[in-house]
Amino acid sequence: MTVPRPAAHESDATLVAAYRSGDERAAAELVRRHGSALARYLYASGAPKSEVEDLVQETFFRAFRAAGSWRGDAEFRSWLLRIGGNLRRDWYRRERGRQMVSIVETDAVDSADPAGEAIAGDQEDRLRDEVGRLPRLQREVFLLRAQQGLDYREIAKTCGTTPGAARVHYHHAVQRLKEILT
């Protein structure tokens, strides 16, 4: 007998309620939906590649342990990203920022334009470095908007600020990155 998997069309709120009622399949569906986005966010915000998987697991562990505190006034993904961001900051404080990992692999991928690939790789390295140098709120807002596609209302809830302040932080981050990369 096979146990039915939660439907992909069920809302996050429905899945959280199902998990709180003891349905572990609902938790698995939430991890499937949001795990990759969380990992991308953590990595882009400075977590070393070797730590991303552990941070993702710890984020979900804490989120599921505190599922009763999620009120649904923010998107589940925003709430999850906030937990993950807090864990990443805690990790950074423990490590004191001593480790920096390149965003690209050192082995070049076969390409029709090796010179173009090299230039693109250099630009990607510079962009990741510069995103890492942005002030914390600018970096978080930029990543949540540019990478995760969140609207300013959700970004504000995730970062504990206002939508207007989120817009300003995003604007300043984009301006700074444009100045540095052009």
Image (cartoon, helix red, strand yellow):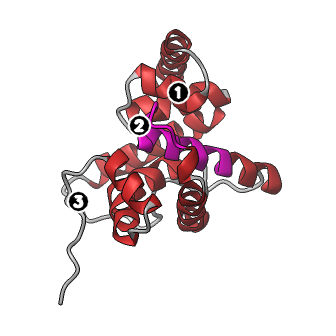
Could one spot residue 25 in this view of the protein? yes
Circle 2/circle 3 CB separation < 8 Å: no
Residue plotted at (38% across, 30% down): 150
What x and y, as percent, mark residue 84? 58, 49
What x and y, as percent, mark residue 147? 39, 38
Give the quarter of the image for residue 110: bottom left
Residue plotted at (59% across, 67% down): 54
**Label 1: which residue?**
157
Q: Which kind of residue does numbered mark 3 sit on?
A: Ser
SS class, disc 3: loop
Which residue occupies the foreground of this view, 15 or 54? 15
Give the quarter of the image for residue 32: bottom left
Residue plotted at (44% across, 21% down): 153
**Label 2: which residue?**
75
- The mark closer to the camera, 1 or 3, is 1
- Residue 111: which disc? 3
CA gap between label 2 and label 3 equals 40 Å
Q: Residue furthest front?
A: 21
Q: Residues within 10 Å of mark 2 (few under 14, many from 20)?
A: some
Q: Which residues are magenta?
A: 70-88
